[in-house]
Image: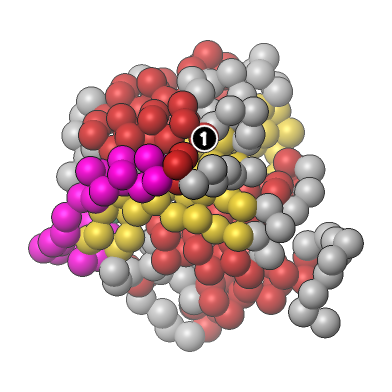
Amino acid sequence: MKRILTMQDLSCAGRCSLTEALPVLSAMGLETAVLPTAVLSSHTAFKNVYGTDLLDTDREILRSWKENGITFDAIYIGYLGSTAAVNVAQEVIVAFGNKIPILIDPAFGDHGRLYRGIDEDFPKTLCTILTKATIICPNLTEACFLTGTPYREDFSDPQYQQLLKKLASICDGTVILTGIDTGNGEIATLLSSGDGGYEKCAIAKEPASFHGTGDLWASAFIGACMRGMPAMDAMNLASRFVKKAIHITLLDHGEPLFGTEFERALPLLINALPRDRVGGGD
Ligand code: PXL
């Protein structure tokens, strides 16, 4: 079984980060090691968030993993939230990232704004590790902040190409731009070919947005890649999974702040995975 290391916060309430990555990757048949950057009462869209960072402990965990000869087949870095956490992520990459896929989901903003508590310089700081990623998957807001492009909800096709080119100059690896509203009832993700060109994966848009869907998408995407799916198929599956999670949540009148009821959409994910040699479950 492949072993993935994921580094992000543990928000105790309000689905996001580790409370999504862990169940999703487990359901996809992947062993998941976690490096929690902080324990927070909830994600930061709630008021009055309390918590403590775990970065000193994280450094000891890294040392212990090295001493025990523990290795990983992929690294998935999500919300970091501070320069100090970016520095630890850098150490993770140096210590464990040799010749394995490294997905970094920038995870610092949405709807044209930085998440609460993220400072203006954070996108620039994050660029120092995005250079080391083999895949990055910013949403449109994050892509605009990373490239110094004024945010708009929709760009013309040449402007998307320009944005992808700028992202490719930040990361040598694969660039995927998520959360593109195509304007005709679809939501798309774009897989950059590096020179401004892209392949598009578009699906019908659900009529509401929920917290934590970016984390859910990134988790399902890296999970599908690690289970052997090509990038476009993995993008398609991750998008269908998130759509289904939103759809179910709307039927159940779920609250946007608590994220989607993705737990009920896990069967879609599991059933879409390629059968492997070992199998299991049936
Ligand atoms: O879903 C992104 C995310 C992850 N972690 C924390 C957050 C957010 C978004 O607000 O606050 C702590």
- Residue at 68 percent across and 65 percent down: it is 29
- Which quarter of the figure has residue 63? top left
Residue 17 lies in the magenta-colored region: no
Q: Is residue 104 above or below residue 26?
A: above
What's the residue type where badge 1 is placed? Phe
- Nearer to me, 94 or 66: 66
Q: Residue furthest bottom?
A: 252
| Crowd around label 1: few <14 · some 14–19 · many ≥20 (10 Å) | many
Residue 48 lies, with reference to residue 68, above or below; the image says below
Q: Quadrant of the N terminus?
A: bottom right
**Can residue 18 be seen from the camera position used here?**
yes
Residue range in magenta is: 41-64
Give percent across and percent down for residue 223. 65, 54
Percent position of residue 11, x then y: 30, 63
Left or right of 207 in this view: 225: right
- Residue 151 visible in the picture: no
Q: Which residue is mark 1?
A: 96
Does 237 sit left or right of 88 as displayed?
A: right
The x, y position of residue 15, in whole percent, is 39, 67
